[in-house]
Image (spheres, rainbow, N blue to C red):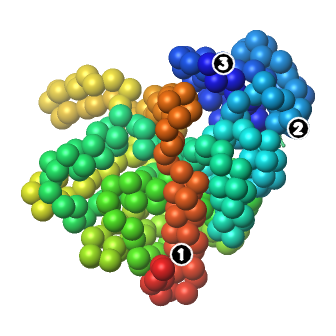
Amino acid sequence: MITFGILGCGRIGRVHAASLAQTDGARIGAVSDAFDSAAQALSQVTGAPARTTDEIIADPAIDAIIIGTPTDTHFDIIHAAARAGKAIFCEKPVDMSADRIRACIAVVEAAGVPFMTAFNRRFETNFAQVRQQIADGAIGPVEIVTIQSRDPAPPPIGYIQSSGGLFRDMMIHDLDMARFLLDEEPVQVFAVGSALVDPAIGAAGDVDTAAVTLTTASGRICQITNSRRATYGYDQRVEVHGARGMLRAENVLEHSVELATEAGFRRAPTLNFFLERYAGAYRAELAHFVAALTAGTVPSPSIHDGLRAQLLADAAAESLATGQPVQLA
Ligand SMILES: NC(=O)c1ccc[n+]([C@@H]2O[C@H](COP(=O)([O-])OP(=O)(O)OC[C@H]3O[C@@H](n4cnc5c(N)ncnc54)[C@H](O)[C@@H]3O)[C@@H](O)[C@H]2O)c1
């Protein structure tokens, strides 16, 4: 039985608490939040005591921690938890700075603790199936990956201002998905972007509409498009074209009933947003982490995957700023 401490009782901390409650071989030993009211609320739901983050990290009865705190707190928590010998499940992005992620890698590897970066989309049933079929050779070598990722509506402007920008905040998931599906590391990044949804986003120095082209050493191409707006709902699709075929994962709808009348065909709306669309993926990623800790195997995606995605996001931001493609080592 793995005993977890949940750090951060906000949006994602509550999701992980609900997932752990359904995960065999895991229990919640304690929860913490910077605001006592948030910690007490999750304590009541889970039955686990509310304690401080420092107390949880210092407690030898806690085997593993979930970092669901704001991104700018991850660095210090990773350092303290690794030194205390805890297994670490860390929300994305690991940090906003690649150099600081490298420092986290050093402390995690020196401590020898298991670490998983929470790129939950790898665990979504359809995307995982696409990956599996690529690995099984169903379409031969991958040639073109297309990722469409659009949020229903932009977040509040206050969030945009502290988000690190669209590439590091939103597209980071798609950049990881690109690596997951390309089967080869991108070596070149070219980005374009605009503020078409809300001029305030442009005034804040960010974009809300963007396209990034990634190219691998052998010439495989991935195109990612993002928008902070989609009038028809949360739009999450991937397509992978290979030498011998094509794989496609469509949106997940509220139900699969289709209505046909003289007016045409009508289908259900997409699942509302990430909490609904990825509910199963959030459960599956934690089940994977618990299974890895139990079996003593290495969980994936790793902290290096966290760094790789960050380097791609940094390169996309640089390409947008300079108008030039950026080469990666
Ligand atoms: N994988 C995903 O799909 C996904 C989705 C949402 C958020 N996230 C990531 O999860 C993290 C948290 O995002 P959120 O939306 O849940 O934020 P949130 O603001 O809803 O929750 C964060 C909570 O952490 C608390 N907190 C701050 N410092 C703390 C500390 N030192 N110890 C304990 N608690 C502390 C805050 O009071 C807040 O309640 C971010 O890194 C974000 O990028 C990932």
Q: Sequence-wise, which precedes: disc 3 or disc 1? A: 3
Near-viewer residue (211 or 15): 15
Mark 1: which amino acid? Ala
Residue at image point 69% right, 33% down = 64
Distance from disc 3 to disc 1, alpha carbons, whole Å, reads: 40 Å
**Residue under numbered circle 3:** 27
Mark 3: which amino acid? Arg
Q: Sequence-wise, which precedes: disc 3 or disc 2? A: 3
Q: Quadrant of ligand 1?
A: top right
Q: Is residue 171 left or right of residue 188?
A: right
Near-viewer residue (316 or 118): 118
Q: Do the residues labelled 3 and 2 touch (CB within 8 Å)?
A: no
Can you give x and y, in whole percent of width and height, for residue 151 in the image?
Answer: 50, 48
**Residue under numbered circle 1:** 315
Can you give x and y, in whole percent of width and height, for residue 193 in the image?
Answer: 50, 72
Q: Is residue 174 above or below residue 165?
A: above
Residue at image point 18% right, 35% down = 264
Q: Is residue 286 visible?
A: no
Residue at image point 78% right, 24% down = 61
Residue 233 placement: quadrant: top left
Assess disc 1: are there few (<14), some (14-19) or many (≥20) residues with their C-alpha within 10 Å of its C-alpha.
many
**Residue under numbered circle 2:** 54
Distance from disc 3 to disc 2, alpha carbons, whole Å, reads: 19 Å
Can you give x and y, in whole percent of width and height, for residue 113 in the image?
Answer: 66, 45
